[in-house]
Image (spheres, rainbow, N blue to C red):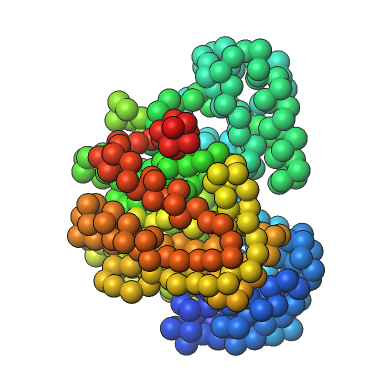
């Protein structure tokens, strides 16, 4: 096992990693940008190293500075969390060259799965159902027109190297295709340095279902059930729950089996997530694989009792999985609400600033809050607006909703705007209560009203 791990991230995920390491008896090194000097993760870690100014490209995405910090502090491994460098194969390769363990899959696996077009071909060979789409990347707009005509509108133009909702455009009319294609190319080039695009048929009114998997270097792969991540705004998840209220047990077993097949086809080692679209007919299709820990991993931990973070660290240290598939039992229901520093009434504009007063709803059975904010902390304007995750667990979905409502009622934060009231609106919508929602729900049922 590692003696010391450098945490190459910030915010609640950095705190989550540091806490897991402390429980495992592993020392930690926090890295921080200048505005994060007083951040909670820098205070909780055993050591902290400044890696640059505010801009992420100069600090949290500065590979040289992060590797230098690891070498200087004699850290044996780097945990990238999510976002930033978590799915960057160049960084994973740099770690390996410097004899530092990257806590995640090998660079070659990140490359193979990070390119969505390549991953799609891999899944076809493995027998995992995929969305009808282009055969590989689209070379130019003429080929895009031909593929769209073959698939039939609406179609989705997607970046091969995309993520976080970037480089995605839905096209419903032929005359809109060229503009969408070129703007998606430009966006993904700026975000990921790669403008390769592919195309898929749009599956209307689908659910976004993902399966958590764990794989070790000995070829063992298990799943931890699924999460329903259909509640999204502009391709960004807002609220997630596990298990999905839409799946029959038969479909659940088939989908989870497909996820294991997908991970084995990739030779996957670490924690990862296979994402599917699930349509009204009961069919499901592979979308992509995320080669990192997910924001929403806590709800899976709540219904399985598996500490995914600790398991990911053990896998990176060369240990076999602590569990077999027969050890995994899904019990109860869990919901996660992402609390963001933003103003929903002003187009969800980010709202950085000083937190004057804070009361977290951390009391009571079945309520968990993952956060890095505290009273007197000033939220910087340079990074993602998510400031906390509230997770509620109940014996069933009805109880989980009731606990989340209670938790949000007790979550008091002053000095900044948040989306807490927006989350309450979702939880108390009659269609959500009935479990009747898909990826269009927020736009059509909440924001349109």
Judged left or right of residue 151, residue 64 is: right
242 is higher (above) or lower (below) than 393: above
Q: Name the quadrant containing residue 23.
A: bottom left
Judged left or right of residue 251, residue 165 is: right
Q: Position of residue 165 (x, y in %)?
A: 58, 42
Q: Quadrant of the C terminus?
A: top left
Q: Position of residue 314 (x, y in %)?
A: 45, 74
Q: Residue at point 41% right, 62% down?
A: 390
Q: Residue at point 22% right, 52% down?
A: 398
Q: Nearer the viewer, residue 292 or 400?
A: 400
Q: Position of residue 226 (x, y in %)?
A: 34, 50
379 is higher (above) or lower (below) than 280: below
433 is higher (above) or lower (below) than 54: above
Q: Position of residue 199 (x, y in %)?
A: 58, 27
Q: Residue at point 67% right, 25% down?
A: 180
86 is higher (above) or lower (below) than 141: below
Q: Nearer the viewer, residue 198 or 379?
A: 379
Q: Nearer the viewer, residue 357 or 273?
A: 357
Q: Name the quadrant containing residue 333.
A: bottom left
Q: Residue at point 59% right, 22% down?
A: 171
């Amino acid at each position: 096992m590692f003696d010391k791990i450098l945490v190459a991230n910030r915010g609640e995920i950095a705190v989550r990693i540091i806490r897991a390491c402390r429980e495992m008896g592993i020392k930690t090194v926090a890295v921080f940008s200048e505005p994060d000097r007083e951040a909670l993760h820098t205070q909780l870690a055993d050591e902290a190293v400044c890696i640059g100014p505010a801009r992420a490209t100069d600090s949290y995405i500065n590979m040289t500075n992060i590797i230098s910090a690891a070498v200087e502090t004699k850290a044996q491994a780097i945990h990238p969390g999510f976002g930033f460098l978590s799915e960057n194969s160049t960084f994973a390769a740099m770690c390996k060259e410097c004899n530092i363990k990257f806590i995640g899959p090998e660079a070659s696996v990140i490359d193979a799965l990070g390119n969505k077009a390549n991953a799609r071909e891999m899944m076809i060979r493995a027998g995992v159902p995929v969305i009808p789409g282009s055969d590989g990347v689209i070379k130019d707009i003429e080929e895009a027109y031909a593929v769209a005509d073959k698939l039939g509108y609406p179609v989705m133009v997607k970046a091969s190297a995309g993520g976080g909702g970037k480089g995605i455009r839905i096209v419903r009319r032929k005359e809109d295709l060229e503009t969408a294609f070129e703007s998606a190319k430009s966006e993904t080039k700026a975000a990921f340095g790669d403008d390769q695009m592919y195309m898929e048929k749009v599956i209307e009114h689908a659910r976004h279902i993902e399966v958590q998997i764990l794989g070790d270097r000995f070829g063992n792969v298990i799943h931890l059930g699924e999460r329903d991540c259909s509640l999204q705004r502009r391709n960004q998840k807002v609220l997630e729950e596990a298990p999905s209220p839409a799946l029959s047990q038969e479909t659940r077993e088939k989908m989870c089996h497909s996820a294991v097949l997908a991970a084995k086809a990739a030779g996957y080692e670490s924690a990862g997530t296979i994402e599917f679209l699930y349509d009204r007919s009961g069919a499901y299709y592979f979308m992509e694989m995320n080669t990192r820990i997910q924001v929403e991993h806590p709800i899976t931990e709540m219904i399985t009792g598996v500490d995914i973070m600790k398991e990911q660290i053990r896998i990176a240290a060369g240990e076999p999985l602590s569990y077999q598939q027969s050890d995994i039992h899904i019990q109860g229901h869990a919901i996660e609400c992402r609390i963001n520093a933003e103003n929903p009434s002003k187009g969800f504009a980010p709202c950085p600033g000083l937190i004057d007063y804070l009361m977290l709803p951390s009391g009571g059975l079945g309520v968990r809050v993952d956060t890095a904010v505290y009273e007197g902390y000033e939220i910087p304007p340079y990074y993602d607006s998510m400031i906390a995750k509230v997770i509620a667990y109940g014996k069933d979905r009805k109880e989980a909703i009731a606990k989340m409502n209670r938790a949000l009622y007790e979550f008091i934060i002053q000095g900044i705007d948040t989306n807490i009231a927006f989350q309450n609106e979702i939880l108390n919508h009659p269609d959500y209560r009935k479990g009747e929602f898909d990826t269009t729900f927020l736009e059509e049922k909440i924001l349109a009203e």
